[in-house]
């Protein structure tokens, strides 16, 4: 099974099944109106058409995917994931596909087993269509993927391939990971839904660790119910019903964050306009100003995670430093200078901030803030993580929705944040918001 | 490099260097009085003499170890670990030695990189002498290792080989892991020092996860300063000075725990006698009774960890169920029945208990409790984890010291527990206690 950058596909299919959401496809498969094979073939056809431009995949093998789809079509339906094709960010192990962590050090690396989340997807009848491109060890060094909406722009990182593949209708769901802003930012840049669950919802066995106290597995999808679908199956959360969601009257905190000046004018105006629209639709919207103690938490996220990078990547930095990018080497070296005492101060400050944010959520169902400083920049960078650092550090569930456009016509995102463990409230209030923003 | 169960060694050496603690050996190496080669040869000689009876090693290759020791002798001293041989529990990845997780599923499995802690040890000049036997995925199914003090008895589990190798003077330090009682119990059964750090002190990248919210890497050593040595080097904690330790006057809580009746008479009498001895030596000793809310936490530890086992081992249970022991299959199946709601209730109860125990530690420097229900039972089991479940669930640092003997003449342990993050206080107060107990 050799990797092929641009798969050649013999199963042509023009029904646009690849544009279905996972929930829609799942209902059709359950109703006998669609097969896993047709859905997968449609997705693979899209990959074949577009991969040269988008380069979302680190590994994909169409023949094996089709064979697996046929097998699934012969089996009883195991769950709502049955027959749904998935992209898996290439920092998550797969026993039958190379896992290269976005690094030259691991070219052709073949793990001996699936990560827990991958094995669970297969157990539930999901189909692993391929591995999506990650930046180097899920950090900031750009990899080959382009923004499918404009190849001169970055798809964002580090879940670059996952965001691009979902945005470009190559696959309905891809798993991503976030340590700073690595799901939310690429989702915003590519115009899809990016969801980072509460810390601890999706099991991390078989994830290549970067910062074990922050690394979180989540999803890139085109709809909020699809984000709910995958986390519910993997964690055992009961299914969220979106019926009656229009009757909600969310308490929304408009949180400009201490980093508001990092956002460009379009993003600022976009968020404020969204707040007005949501208030107009019936939400109770109020400003939330984070006190000064929050302003240092971006730096604390960086110190804390760098201390962990330095240790987690010890093998790589001691054996293969020549194959690590200068940017990451710099982060690793900085992490080596963070003393244990300073690390513990960061942990303590973080714990205190988690308590303070829990107090703020007594008055709000969700906060909204920018997803990124603006639209996707050029391909020389993967953009700035500034609007993800705080929420990831606080281990809160967050979700970005496409809303509005920047000066180049690329999408902007709005980030929704809920209290720890309130992932269902996040889905419902974000869905209510999405419907009202799209109505606008 | 083929594994050899009983290494044949050509470098004989009768100086008993293998009986040195890591700190003593480190000082001698620094002073030019000992070489890594001589120390390693002495350890390997002990392995050659004893491995047939003890079976502590999953993999060991004497020739490579000696070559590495010679290389280290030619290099400038990199840290206090320079030239010190280590055993590594076989659930922790090594790039140059097979890592089999104590499971037939992974016979001959060769990871592509070192776990963070292994790469760090090598970076600091430590020598990885071999892999020590783990029970199946660090759970309870016995593996081949025997108690070096009496081969009719278990060494305990799951860090069976690490405890036995250190107790039998095959190596001064071995890494172990603990999810329930897997460092403390085998250390107590084999009569050595077992130390489980505060959660988050030793990086876990490259550890095979069982229960990611509890799994903790720690050490088995013959002295407390050796336990301090390894965690300080890996985490960056400043070195603990044991000078002046005799002047301490610890505030010690005698904590019989809600599971006191699980302890046999010898263990009960032993702990109470130790408390009297320590009080006689100047400690302020008072009873600590954990309120009823703590009594359910053993069951909560089991539910919470089983939910995580079920997910972490999804690949193994879906592909290789025939190679998993009935006991572990039972735990995995039970974990599949723990709902997400129940899991979250367990998490909430645990968080509340962590707060309550923090309050208790305002009045005490350390608590003491049994390390295990009694001395090592026969080889059909690895003993009961009951006296480890609570402390591991609460993520507290704990350390067992050998103290007293059971009816068969095998060692008993006393467990010392400190508040979260108070690992230095644990070392100092446990060292004070050890000195006074040995004087008794």
Image (cartoon, coloured by chain):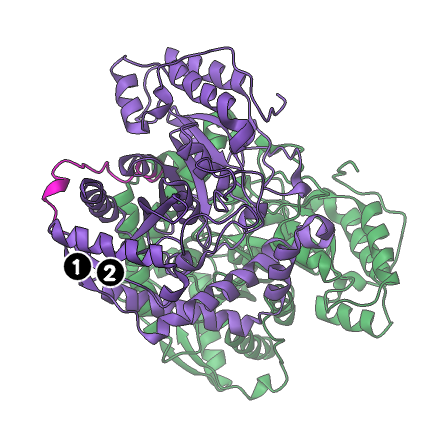
Chain colours: A green, B purple
- Where is residue B315 drawn, in percent x and y? 67, 51
In the displayed structure, does residue B307 sit left or right of residue B399? right
The residue lying toward the viewer, choosing from A146 and B163, is B163
Q: Residue at x 53, y 47 (%)?
A: B138
Q: Where does the magenta region start and end? A: B231-249
Q: Which label is found at residue A384?
A: none
Q: Is residue A111 visible?
A: no
The residue lying toward the viewer, choosing from B221 and A231, is B221
Give the mark nearest the N terminus, 1 or 2: 2
Q: Residues within 10 Å of mark 2 (few under 14, many from 20)?
A: many
What is the quadrant of residue B2 in the picture?
top right
- Where is residue A321 drawn, in percent x and y? 48, 27
Q: Which residue is mark 2?
A: B254
When the figure is inspected, residue B115 is found, relative to residue A253, above or below; the finding is above
What is the quadrant of residue A356 in the picture?
bottom left
Quadrant in which the C terminus of chain B is drawn: top left
Callout 2: SS? strand
The residue lying toward the viewer, choosing from A80 and A393, is A80
Per the model, the C-alpha gap separating discs 1 and 2 is: 7 Å
The residue lying toward the viewer, choosing from A237 and B261, is B261
Asked whether the residues under the numbered discs 1 and 2 touch, taking CB atoms below 8 Å apart as contact, a structural biologist would say: yes
Discs 1 and 2 lie in a common subunit: yes
Q: Chain of mark 1?
A: B
Quadrant in which the N terminus of chain B is drawn: top right
- Where is residue A126 drawn, in percent x and y? 74, 59
Q: Is residue B248 visible?
A: yes
In the displayed structure, does residue A140 sit left or right of residue A78? left
Q: Which label is found at residue B285?
A: 1
């Amino acid at each position: 099974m050799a990797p092929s950058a641009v798969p050649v596909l013999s199963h042509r299919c023009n029904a646009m099944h690849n544009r279905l959401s996972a929930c829609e496809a799942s209902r059709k498969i359950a109703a006998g109106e669609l097969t896993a094979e047709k859905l997968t073939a449609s997705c693979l056809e899209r990959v074949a058409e577009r991969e040269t431009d988008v380069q979302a995949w680190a590994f994909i093998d169409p023949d094996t995917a089709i064979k697996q789809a046929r097998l699934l079509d012969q089996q009883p339906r195991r769950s709502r994931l049955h027959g749904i094709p998935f992209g898996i960010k290439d920092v998550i192990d797969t026993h039958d596909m190379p896992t290269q962590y976005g690094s030259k050090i691991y070219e052709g690396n073949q793990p001996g087993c699936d990560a827990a989340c991958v094995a669970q997807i297969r157990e539930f009848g999901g189909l692993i269509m391929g591995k999506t491109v990650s930046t180097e060890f899920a950090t900031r060094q750009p990899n080959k993927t382009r923004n499918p909406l404009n190849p001169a722009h970055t798809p964002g990182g580090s879940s670059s391939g996952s965001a691009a593949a979902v945005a470009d209708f190559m696959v309905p769901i891809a798993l991503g990971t976030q340590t700073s802003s690595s799901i939310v930012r690429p989702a915003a840049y590519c115009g899809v839904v990016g969801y980072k669950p509460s810390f601890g919802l999706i099991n991390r066995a078989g994830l290549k660790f970067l910062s074990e106290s922050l690394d979180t597995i989540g999803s890139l999808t085109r709809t909020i119910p699809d984000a709910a679908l995958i986390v519910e199956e993997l964690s055992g959360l009961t299914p969220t019903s979106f019926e009656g969601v229009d009757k909600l009257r969310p308490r929304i905190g408009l949180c400009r964050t201490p980093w508001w000046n990092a956002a460009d004018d379009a993003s600022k105006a976009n968020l404020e306009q969204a707040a007005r629209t949501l208030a107009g639709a019936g939400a109770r919207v109020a400003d939330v100003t984070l006190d000064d103690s929050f302003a240092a938490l971006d730096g604390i996220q960086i110190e804390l995670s760098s201390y962990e990078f330095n240790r987690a990547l010890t093998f790589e930095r001691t054996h293969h430093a020549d194959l690590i990018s200068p940017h990451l080497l710099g982060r690793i070296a900085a992490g080596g200078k963070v003393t244990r005492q300073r690390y513990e101060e960061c942990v303590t400050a973080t714990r205190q901030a988690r308590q303070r944010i829990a107090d703020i959520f007594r008055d709000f169902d969700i906060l909204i803030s920018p997803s990124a400083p603006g639209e996707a920049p050029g391909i020389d960078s993967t953009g700035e993580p500034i609007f993800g650092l705080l929420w990831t550090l606080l281990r809160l569930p967050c979700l970005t929705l496409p809303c509005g456009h920047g000066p180049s016509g690329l999408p902007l995102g709005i980030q929704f944040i809920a209290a720890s463990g309130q992932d269902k409230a996040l889905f419902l209030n974000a869905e209510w918001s999405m419907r009202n923003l799209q109505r606008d």
